[in-house]
Amino acid sequence: MSRETRTARRHRSEVEAARVTREVATRAVRRLDVLEWVILFGAAVLSAAAGALVALMVARPLGLPYRMTWIVASLLIFGVPGWLAVRRAKREDEAFRERILKEIGGSDV
């Protein structure tokens, strides 16, 4: 077997391995995206239920309309933790970016 044939065969197997890896990674990303949406939907449902419970306990004693109390409570229960999580994720991304730039000795791009 000539050297060119072995090199070509090795190249083909590496290309095939890269293709399979890409397919597996794409499938994993797609599944994680679905899982993310399921978790987000679940959080929205739970916040609506918690908002209803809060409205049941608070609306009548405070003389507030139930539906408006439910909407506001649900948005607060869903929105405040969501906002905090997004803010924390942005902070972590910025810290990661700064650490990488410091390691490679580059400037902010």
Image (cartoon, rainbow, N blue to C red):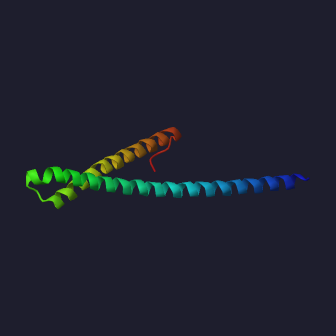
**Left or right: where does residue 87 sit relative to residue 29?**
left
Q: Residue at x 41, y 41 (%)?
A: 95
Image coordinates of residue 77 in percent, x first then y, are 26, 50
Place residue 24 in its image quadrant.
Answer: bottom right
Asked whether the viewer can see residue 39, the reply is yes
- Toward the viewer: 16 or 62? 62
Image coordinates of residue 70 in percent, x first then y, are 20, 57
Image coordinates of residue 51 in percent, x first then y, are 24, 53
Asked whether the viewer can see residue 79, the reply is no
Q: Residue at x 8, y 55 (%)?
A: 63
Q: Residue at x 49, y 42 (%)?
A: 100
Image coordinates of residue 60 in percent, x first then y, are 11, 54
- Toward the viewer: 82 or 90? 82
**Left or right: where does residue 83 sit relative to residue 52?**
right
Report the residue that reaches farthest toward the right: 1
**Left or right: where does residue 10 sit relative to residue 73?**
right
